[in-house]
Each structure stands twice: as C-alpha cells, then as structure tokens.
C-alpha cells in the first residue's frame, strides 16, 4: 500500500471484478497483483454442503447453468446453488454478470470474452490459491469472506456459518491477529458466530437498508448511535453502503453523514461498499471526488471493483 494512500485498506470486491468475471480465481489473482490488501469471498453452500465462492444463492446470472441443467430450476424459475452437488457445480462455466430478464451484461463495458473457461471455486481452493500467491509473490493479502443468507441456508438444512468457520480454521484464520475479516448482513448471525460458535477472529456487521424480513435485522437501528453501541462488544467494524457516508445533490454539493464518527466512537472500523469507476454514486462528479470524500470522512477501508484505482 502506498505511503500516501488516502484509503488505509483496499478490499477487492469479488476480486478485480471490474476487469474479469467476479469471484473467479483470475479475478483474485489480478487483485492480488494490483496490491489489494484484502480479497473478498462471498460464500454459499452446495447440495453436499461444500462452501463455494459465489455472490448469490442463484447460479443463473453468472453461469451457463440454464444451458447445462435446464430441468433443475425451481418453481420460481431460478437455479439455486444448494440444489447442485459440488461435482455438478464444477461442470458450469462462469461469465460476466448478466441481467436475468434481458440477458445483457449488467456492466456493458466490462469483460466481454466468451472462450475462456472460468469455474466456480470452493472456499478452500480460493484460500489455498491466495496463500500460495502470498508465498510466491512475497506480499501478503488477507481474505474477507461473507456468509451469504445464513437464515435461508438453515431453512434449506445447511448451517453455512459452521462450515465456513471450519474451513477458516483449517487454513489458520481463527484470531484477530490473522488477516481475515468475516462479514455478514444478518445481525443475529453475527452475534451467533461470536457467542455460540465462539469465533475469535475479526467480525464485520454489514449494513443494508430498511428492515430485512428474513433475518429480522433492522439496518436503520444499526446505523443509529444506540445500534452501533450494541454492536461494540460483538463486531469489530461495520460495512455500510457508500450512500450512508457520502452523498451529492443535483448541484454537485457533497455532504458527509455522521455515521463514521459515531462508529469510531464505539471503536468500530468502517469499510463501506462499493467503489465502482463505471457506476459512481448518483450525482458524484468523478472517481477522484468519491475517493477524496471518503478519505475526508475518515473511513478505514473500502470495497472496490477496480482496486487499483483507489490508491493509484
């Protein structure tokens, strides 16, 4: 990390996902070479309860599952990772994220290749890859796994948190000194990970908007001074949306909220998501303006699709 870096910690969001398909090993290797401090892993489970690195519980927007297994969709028309064994998952080819309705790329100017065979990695495969890159390159990048939809996974008969923690333990990520942040949107799962499952590593409470009906998490409360105080003895930081920290009006005037200050009052780090050069916040004039505003807000780190652009 440059000595004059404006943002202390750069987290590669799904890897270098602004350049190659998200959550592929190529995306992680590219982000590692770009100097990202941490590489993110979203984790879901397969039918045989293997943790794999995927952003969604669905497979259809980023893979060719509909072509390879056309009869395996559920009644809602979606294809779910937990309905496929790991062996079946490994038959799929990944591509750039597409809109489910139109079939067009969500980010049309990103990777457009069609011949490379990108696959879905297991969590263990990805961690082994990153640790091997750390050894061969001489620079150390940490990992930043997210437990996706834990309440939904339990409804499907899988304790996702338990299997993720087992894998983390196997690779030596157990303490706060280890280069691993574990994150989740579900407030009650974050508390369960700390209190019931006895995880001693770094924990991040992700913060969305409104009220999550599945988990019962009230994000508006979590963003309040009282909610942040409640997190203090459980979490080590929060991961809010960029818009909860910095906003621009239609005239280009920037406003900073008090969220970072209130979080720091409770000794909570703040790692907002997501800086995208090709999808800036509404009315934000430039990537440079966004980075400068976030630095002024004194955030501790940031998720970025183009990690090399945060501290060039």
Image: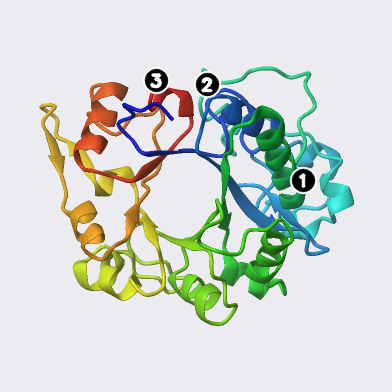
Q: Please indicate, yes or no, whether residue 128 appears anywhere in the rendered image.
A: yes
Tell me the quarter of the picture where residue 174 sits.
Answer: bottom right
Q: Nearer the viewer, residue 160 or 250?
A: 160
Foreground tag (3 vs 2): 3
Q: Which residue is drawn at 22% across and 66% down?
A: 224
Q: Is 144 left, or right, of 172 in this rendering?
A: left
Residue 136 x %, y %: 71, 30
Q: Residue 304 carries which label?
A: none
Looking at the rendering, in which quadrant would you find the N terminus? top left
Q: Which residue is drawn at 39% across and 41% down?
A: 302
Residue annotated with mark 2: 108
**Dot placed on the residue nearer the N-terminal end, 1 or 2:** 2
Foreground tag (1 vs 2): 1
Q: Which residue is drawn at 81% across and 39% down?
A: 92
**Dot placed on the residue nearer the N-terminal end, 3 or 2:** 2
Q: Which mark is residue 312?
A: 3
Q: Please indicate, yes or no, whether residue 79 appears anywhere in the rendered image.
A: no
Q: Distance between the residues labelled 3 and 2?
A: 24 Å
Q: Is 268 left, or right, of 169 in this rendering?
A: left
- Identify the coloring: rainbow
User: Outermost residue toward the right?
Assistant: 87
Residue 78 x %, y %: 68, 51
Residue 268 x %, y %: 32, 60
Residue annotated with mark 1: 125
Tell me the quarter of the picture where residue 137 sits.
Answer: top right
Residue 191 x %, y %: 47, 76
Give the SS element for disc 2. loop
Q: In this view, does 285 lie above or below 22?
A: above
Q: Distance between the residues labelled 3 and 1?
A: 30 Å
**Dot placed on the residue nearer the N-terminal end, 3 or 1:** 1
Give the SS element for disc 1. helix
Q: In this view, does 219 lie above or below 274?
A: below
């Amino acid at each position: 990390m440059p000595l004059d870096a404006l943002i202390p910690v750069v987290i590669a969001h799904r890897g270098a996902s602004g350049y190659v398909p998200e959550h592929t090993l190529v995306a992680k290797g590219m982000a590692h070479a770009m100097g990202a401090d941490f590489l993110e892993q979203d984790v879901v489970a397969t039918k045989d309860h293997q943790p794999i690195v995927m952003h969604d519980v669905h497979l259809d927007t980023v893979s060719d599952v509909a072509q390879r297994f056309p009869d395996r969709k559920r009644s809602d028309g979606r294809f779910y990772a937990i309905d496929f064994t790991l062996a079946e998952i490994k038959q799929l080819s990944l591509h750039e994220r597409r809109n489910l309705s139109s079939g067009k790329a969500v980010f049309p100017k990103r990777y457009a290749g069609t011949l490379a065979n990108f696959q879905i990695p297991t969590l263990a495969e990805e961690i082994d890859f990153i640790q091997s890159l750390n050894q061969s390159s001489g620079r150390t990048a940490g990992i930043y796994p997210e437990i996706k939809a834990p309440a939904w996974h339990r409804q499907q008969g899988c304790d996702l948190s338990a299997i993720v923690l087992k894998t983390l333990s196997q690779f030596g990520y157990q303490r706060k000194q280890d280069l691993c942040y574990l994150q989740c949107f579900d407030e009650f799962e974050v508390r369960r990970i700390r209190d019931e499952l006895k995880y001693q590593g770094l924990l991040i409470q992700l913060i969305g908007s409104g009220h999550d009906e599945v988990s019962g998490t009230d994000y508006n409360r979590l963003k309040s001074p009282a909610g942040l105080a409640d997190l203090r003895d459980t979490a080590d930081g929060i991961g809010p949306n960029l818009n909860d920290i910095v906003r621009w009006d239609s005239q280009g005037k920037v406003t900073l909220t008090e969220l970072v200050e209130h979080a720091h009052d409770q000794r909570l780090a703040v790692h907002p998501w997501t800086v995208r050069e090709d999808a800036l916040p509404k009315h934000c004039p430039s990537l440079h303006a966004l980075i400068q505003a976030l630095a002024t807000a004194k955030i501790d780190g940031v998720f970025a699709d183009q990690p090399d652009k945060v501290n060039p």
